[in-house]
Amino acid sequence: MPATAIATDGAILAAQAAFPPFETSTFPSQLFWFAISFGVLYFLLSRWMLPRIGSAIEERRDRVADDLDAAAQMKAQSDEAVRTYEKSLADARAKAQSVAANARAEMERQIAEETTQVDAELAKKSEAAEARIAEAKAKALSEVRVIAASAAADVARHLAGVDVTEADAAAAVDAKA
Amino acid sequence: MASNPIDQFQLQTIAEFSVGGLDLSFTNSSYYMLVAAGLTIGLLAMAMSRPALVPGRMQSVAELTYEFVAGMIRSTAGTDGLRFFPLVFTLFAFILMANMLSMMHYFPSPGWYGFTIMSHIIITFALSMIVMSVLVIYGIWKNGMKFFSLFFPAGVPWPLYFLLTPIEIISFLSRPVTLSMRLFANMLAGGILLKVFAGFVVMMGAAGGLIAVGAIAPMVMVVALTGLKFLIAFLQAYVFAVLTCIYLSDALHPGHH
């Protein structure tokens, strides 16, 4: 393309100069050096650089995945430990409760036993005491009759001057009682 | 420096070299292509010199680029498209590095001139022809004659094929043209635009007086355009790589088009 279009713009231009991108005489040289530089670049990138970058990225991805796996495994382990701990805690609690219940039952049994024993003893004692009281009462009553009879005989003698035998006085006290 | 905005695209022979009458001279373009390839491989090698489990800054950039291209392929061509990963990565890295080098207007080189490799249509055409040859050769090798079902979209009443097949063929043949044109035109236009506005700054500044003060306007424009050109430099490399993936997915699954 002639450069007249640019020349009308007032640019300083040698009239015979062609538009550089359309100068076909430069094409072989450009293509030749383009093929060399692009070819070498393609070769070096595809054989050397890109696998290097790719493996670096891959390695990081693997490493992160490994770390995540390890973390998940550790979490599972700690969960397991927590579960075991809670289970043993629950066992211990249940055991403690059963021990406490056993102890309570044993104690109640003992208390009941001792209570019945003591009750029986007390009953025996009170029976004996009652028997003694009854005996003493009977004895006292019989003595009271004798005293009353003799008192009555004395009263009869002193007031009426009548001699009353002991037996009569006793019969009179009995009849009055 | 030359004041003509076209001069920046001029090839300058550094070392004469010809084989059988064919001029294969080492030029500033050749120099920049070698630099682009060398910088790409050198920076990556430096970044990956000691791959660490927790990457440093440079290794992060290398790995991000790797994942970026791999993700691009996976989303457009599927996981089996990853067999083209080295090719797509090389294309992306080479174009990106070439475009970034074009942003350095005084890069260390013979003559200290910057150069835009992708402003020469023969290079962008060569890039797109690499893609198209891989597409056609791999497509036929993998799918045999089924590769040509690309031109016969499924689920269409048969009379429509008289209309659709020529359209599909034309669209297929225009792929290398549009692919190379897009990159070429963007980089060419960006370079010209920058030089034109920069030229205004110099011309207005030289005029002196009030006009010289007005030179601030094209100066602001140059700064803004430089930012825009950085975006375009990246975007065109990305677009080229994405379209490559989309085209290459036709080689893998010519049926679903």
Image (spheres, helix red, strand yellow):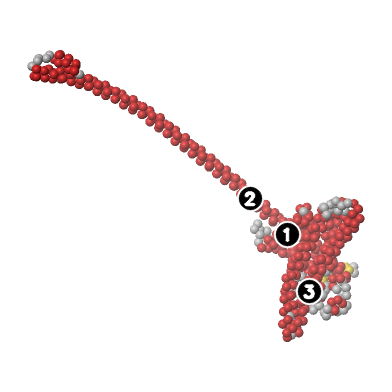
Quick one: label 1 or label 3, which is nearer the N terminus?
A: 1
Image quarter where the C terminus of chain A lies is top left
Report the residue marked by disc 3.
B193
Q: CA distance from mark 1 to mark 2?
A: 25 Å
**Quadrant hosting residue A135:** top left
Residue B76 point in image, percent of width and height: 77, 56
Residue type (three-letter) at the residue carrying disc 2:
Leu
Residue A17 point in image, percent of width and height: 86, 76
Report the residue marked by disc 2.
A68
Image quarter where the N terminus of chain A lies is bottom right
Relative to A142, does residue B15 appear above or below in the rendering? below
**Chain for numbered disc 1:** B
The reply to whether label 1 and label 3 mark residues of one chain is yes
Question: Is residue B42 shown left or right of residue A129?
Answer: right
Residue A28 is tagged as none
Residue type (three-letter) at the residue carrying disc 1:
Phe
Find numbered disc 1 in the image and state the secondary structure of the residue it sits on: helix
